[in-house]
Image: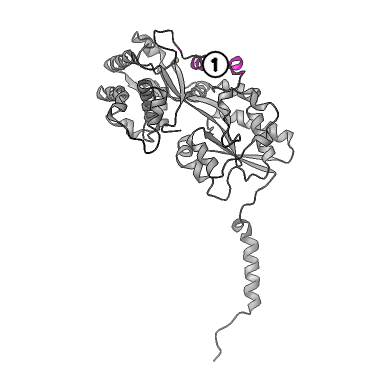
Amino acid sequence: MRGPFKRPSWFWGALLVIAFLLTGRRLALSHPNPHRLRFAHTFTTESERKILDAAVAEFQASHPGLEIEQTASNSEVYNTIGWRLQFQGRAAPDIFFHWQGFKVEYCIENGWAMDMSPYLSPGFVDAFIPSVIRKQKGGIYFLPQSVDISNLIWYNRDSFARLRLREPPSLEEWLRDCVAIRGAGVLPLAQGNRDLWPMGNFAAELLGQTMGADAAGRLFRPATPIQPGDLRGLGAFEFLLRNHCFELPGVLGPGAIGALNDIDAKILFLNGQSAQHILGSWFLADIEDARQKNEIQFSIGVFPIPAAAGEVDAMTAVSTGFLVNPRTPNPRAAVAFLELLLSRKYQSQFARLGNLSVRRDARSFTDDPLATRMRRPTRVTRRSRRRCFMTRAAGF
């Protein structure tokens, strides 16, 4: 009786070689490529992508053989987990978008951000407002794209005119207007807070107006006790809830604010189903896209959240911008691309979408009516001038 057939050892060796040849590319670790830069960002509207694509094409034309590979993510996903996860895989970005604040500091502390100082062109940072070019740990790790005003009240001008409403000079008047709007059978506010940050930003501004910027900032420091009196500014939010200003029969049911996300709420407003929508200055890019597609059937206005009588006339804002991975194989090219993207040429194009550039010459190329309105939010009242402060509130 013959024993079981045994293949010679060379057979198994040959099989292993063939398997490696067939799958080696998939099994191999990703190696840095000095001729390719991965660029991760959250610019997802068609208008924004056209600007980025033009900048990428210009840079590649002036750097033959160098390719920029873009990865665009939904801002909500990127803001919550995406910015961390992108450093856990085999293809970490060379250049990436971020919001200034504790997340940038976290990237620096974890070795995910590079000091760009040695690669910046002489005089480049002088083109920006000094306060937005921050030295952190003795270096420049973050280059600013814009300042985003965190909370603005976007409103349907046609609805306001029909109801004989004006831009309110005080928080008290705005709250009364919201009740009047609902009484007229119109949804006062289309808001989606499933991801928590939209109303977190709104709450931060209410607290800042009640307590002042410095005291409100204390609320967002870890292990800091919060006293009941610190939260009195949230009374306005409670008033809106109590008076059903986030709901309307036939449009949104009770509790819908917690079921909708930010995109759902945007669509409701742009479709004309609500009189107002609270969101940051970046909403103008969505408005511009909807305009180009003839999807907006009404005129849109904007005003800052007004302060209550006797309170600080303040608004929350955060700077956005870019960092470079210290492990990039081509740091000089990465910084050179950012200098092109942040040049007057491309910043002026972003400004047409409502981008609030922090270049010194931004006023001369910001001509969109709504963007211009956002650049001068102070109203002539008996209150003090409107102050702008940076926040680390939810979403930033």
Q: Tag 1: Cα neighbours inside 10 Å, few (<14), some, or many (≥20)? A: some
The quarter of the image holding the N terminus is bottom right
Left or right, 296 with respect to 94, comes to: left
* Residue in view at x 60 percent, y 29 percent: 50
**Residue range (magenta):** 360-382
How far across and how far down the image is residue 148, in percent? Answer: 50, 25
How far across and how far down the image is residue 200, in percent? Answer: 38, 30
* Residue in view at x 63 percent, y 78 percent: 9
Quadrant assignment, res 365: top right
Residue bearing the label numbered 1? 368
How far across and how far down the image is residue 378, in percent? Answer: 46, 13
Is 97 above or below relative to 368?
below
The answer to whether one can see residue 181 in this image is: yes
* Residue in view at x 74 percent, y 33 percent: 62
Query: In this view of the protein, which residue sits in the foreground, 226 or 32?
Result: 226
Amino acid identity at mark 1? Asp
Q: Is residue 225 magenta?
A: no
Query: In this view of the protein, which residue sits in the foreground, 360 or 269?
Result: 360
Quadrant assignment, res 6: bottom right
Q: Secondary structure at mark 1?
A: loop
Query: In this view of the protein, which residue sits in the foreground, 311 or 280?
Result: 311
How far across and how far down the image is residue 235, in percent? Answer: 29, 23
Q: Is residue 379 magenta?
A: yes
* Residue in view at x 69 percent, y 26 percent: 123
Quadrant assignment, res 326: top right
